[in-house]
Image (cartoon, grey):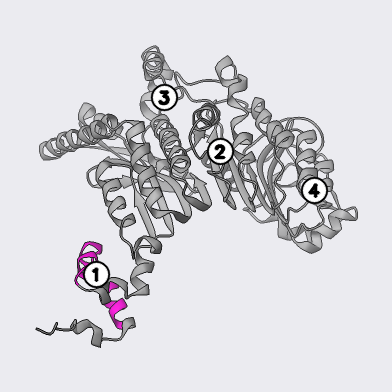
Amino acid sequence: MAKTPCPMTAIPPDVVGIILDNLELVDVKSIRLTCKYLSTVGPRFKHFIAQQTTDLSVESLRSQRELASHPQLRSAVKELVVMAAVFDTSELDRMLKTKRRRIVEVKGPFTTTTETGLTDDELLQAASDLEWMHAQQTHQRIQTLPESIDALAAVLRLYGALDTIDVDACVTKSPRTRVSTAQAGEWHPVFIRASEVYQITTSAICLSGVSLNSLLIYRETPKCSVTSFDVTSHMAKIEAMPGFASAFSSLENFALSFSTRVQTDFSKIESARDGLEGAAAAYHNLLGSNAGQYSDEDPEATVEENFPGIASMLRLMPKLDAFDLHMTNTLGGPSTAYQKIFDHIADEVKLPLLTQVFFCGIPASEKSLLAFIDNHQSISDLTIDEMELTSGSWKRVIRHISQLPDLSRLNLSNLFYEQHVFNLLSKPLGDDEQQPYQKPENSYRCGRGFKVHTRSFSSAEIKLLRTGLEFDDTNIGRSLGSPQLMRWGQIRAFKYSV
């Protein structure tokens, strides 16, 4: 008996692709299994599955393994997002305790908080939601890190090669509410899970032998970082894994958001909270606090084990074209001791193909900055944001940076020295020429002039820096209260603190 041809073969492939794009993924998978023609048609559909996401749950990893096992479809997957899923019960706990719902409204630079009472039905729903959340936490807790590593490694091994692995995070507050990590009720559970998922992902990369172009770790994830201590301690573990030596050798792009030391013993945090009294207890109950967390004076926060891991990671990436390092300060005080991270990078890292660099939130000395620049003369695009210069002069550093032969773009923002902001306003420009740098997003007013905290330099301005363009170091007095100053402070706090 002659086989009946698939009626879809009579439809132009572009039209078939449009049809597939309008179906749910589970239905498309079923359709593509009905005949050989439909299993290979549809570049639009392959684009539809190019980015995949796993939250490392058993079900999610099983689904990824099925996709990675498909002989036609696995090559269409270009990016895998590994999601650090955080189940935050703090709001539900508070609702059931107080029988009130908190409503937060943000209006420009001002935030208002109001509370309304809950009905009996709303209280029942909150109790049901909390039960569901506890079940999700239990599922996540009983799934061990070695189990997750092995399962993710199996998926990556089947894919073989990916353009990008993007490690991200999200916060679930109820069965119906998923929010950004910036909206978590408590920040430290986010950081703890972030470090776990970092360890799972980097271990799986080593074990799988997957080839990667880009590895992005919490690059665009606010209020979420891997502690530098965990980066260092985990290096000792993955160094013993098969495939470690070449695991990151193909990377051309790398981004890492890391932080200062974080207390992971929750019993110590609870004990510190229980000891709060009076105004401190009231403040914590209303807005939260860092009670029980490390401060800049704690020895654990400044021991050497916090510092060398990031340089060790970068040394494994000889083909890097670009990297982005972002540091979050969790200490509630100065983080200048973490200049040692930059010292290690300056002393140990030499990347011959490096062209684009982002340093954000990391303190450094003039000596280490100049050494890094001397070791990477191929840089063409450099961004430095929120950096405390622990010794030396920003004028000398910027002049040295400007001598990079291929530098075509330079972005400088929030450069500090001795707790002062370096003024990026140049001299002897006239008023008309200064105006572009006095926009609200770039500057704020002081007693006797403007402080320019953010400035981008074009190729023409870089040439002027090379030939002697200087910055105005006139004493312009203290900053004046203004919406611009308030907004600047809020942005800095959002990006670089908890």
Q: Position of residue 286 (x, y in %)?
A: 37, 28
First-in-chain label (1 vs 2) = 1
- Mark 4–mark 3 distance (CA, rounded to whole Å): 45 Å
Instruction: Please name the residue that numbered disc 3 is placed on.
Output: 283
Classify residue 142 as left or right of residue 214: left
Confirm whether residue 432 shows in the render.
no
Q: Residue furthest right?
A: 467
Q: Which residues are magenta?
A: 15-34
Q: Position of residue 177 (x, y in %)?
A: 27, 46
| Few, some or many residues within 10 Å of mark 4 (<14, 14–19, 20+) | many
Residue at 85%, 58% in the rendered image: 464
Instruction: Please name the residue that numbered disc 2 is placed on.
Output: 496
Element class at badge 3: helix
- Mark 4–mark 1 distance (CA, rounded to whole Å): 55 Å
Instruction: Please name the residue that numbered disc 4 is placed on.
Output: 401
As for residue 22 lying within the magenta part, the answer is: yes
